[in-house]
Amino acid sequence: EDKVVQSPLSLVVHEGDTVTLNCSYEVTNFRSLLWYKQEKKAPTFLFMLTSSGIEKKSGRLSSILDKKELFSILNITATQTGDSAVYLCAVEQGGSEKLVFGKGTKLTVNP
Amino acid sequence: DAGVIQSPRHEVTEMGQEVTLRCKPISGHNSLFWYRQTMMRGLELLIYFNNNVPIDDSGMPEDRFSAKMPNASFSTLKIQPSEPRDSAVYFCASSLLQGETQYFGPGTRLLVL
């Protein structure tokens, strides 16, 4: 059965800390891995990763994929209270457009 | 661009009633997805359409759930009859092409009493 496992489930840090969120997957016919940020509403797209070892970066957020070890990490440096959200990892299967989501990591950044 | 539009945003109904959720995808997007999100199960794909045709409905929980996409700019998800365990947030998402990023609507928060 296809599955995506995120860790930790919950994380509480102070402003300025650096955090690393993990996502491992077992999916047949892997096509891409995506990261979404969900605050109190809809998930919003962060990154799409298709190739191993190539870091995607957007401001303080960055992500990398390891297709050999079947995992990805999302790094957030110099965290701010506005980074508080649930971060979702999803894997897309080739040949379809289905996304299999992990349960998410709930990040709380305290001032 | 208005993004994906869903209605209603909130729905409270009684067990046994019919519920219809509506979605308008981003104009020009060819794929539309219906998801359900609960605390226990996270975000789950229910069904998706490509060019208005249902491609995969393996995530639809049971016969009480049905979805239609009569044209490129409108889709419905219907639950009949509704049950308390259907209470969840239902998201609609759309993407331009296969393999492209999915953009989510604001969701419909459904509570079945």
Image (cartoon, grey):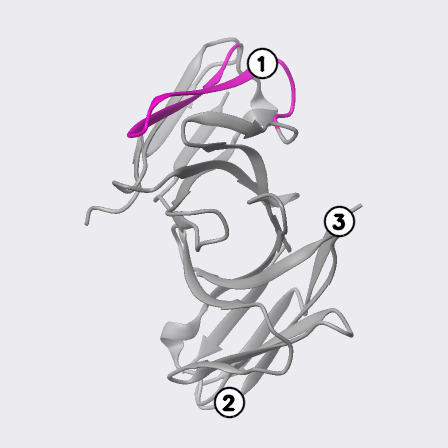
| Residue count near mark 1 (Cα–Cα under 10 Å), binned few <14, some 14–19, many ≥20 | few
* Disc 1 target residue: B64
| Residue count near mark 2 (Cα–Cα under 10 Å), binned few <14, some 14–19, many ≥20 | few
Q: Tell whether B63 sits left or right of A5.
A: left
Indicate the position of residue B82 as horizontal and vertical percent values: 53, 15
Subunit under mark 1:
B
For the residue labelled by badge 3, is the local secondary structure a helix, a strand or a loop? loop
Instruction: Tell me which amino acid carries mark 1.
Output: Arg
For the residue labelled by badge 1, is the local secondary structure a helix, a strand or a loop? loop
Q: Nearer the viewer, mark 3 or mark 2?
A: 3
| Residue count near mark 3 (Cα–Cα under 10 Å), binned few <14, some 14–19, many ≥20 | few
Subunit under mark 2:
A
Q: Give me the C-alpha separation between circle 3 and circle 1.
A: 25 Å
Q: Earlier in the sequence, mark 3 or mark 2?
A: 3
Vertically, is B38 above or below A92? Answer: above
Instruction: Tell me which amino acid carries mark 2.
Output: Asp
Indicate the position of residue A42 as horizontal and vertical percent values: 40, 50
Q: Nearer the viewer, mark 1 or mark 2?
A: 1
Indicate the position of residue A24 as horizontal and vertical percent values: 72, 66
Q: Nearer the viewer, mark 3 or mark 1?
A: 3
Instruction: Tell me which amino acid carries mark 3.
Output: Asp
- Seen from the viewer's position, the closer of residues B92 and B12 is B92
Indicate the position of residue B57 as horizontal and vertical percent values: 60, 27
For the residue labelled by badge 2, is the local secondary structure a helix, a strand or a loop? loop
Q: Which residues are magenta?
A: B60-80
* Disc 3 target residue: A2
Vertically, is A104 above or below B62? Answer: below
Q: How many marks?
A: 3
Q: Magenta stretch: residue B70 in it?
A: yes
Q: Give me the C-alpha separation between circle 1 and circle 2.
A: 47 Å
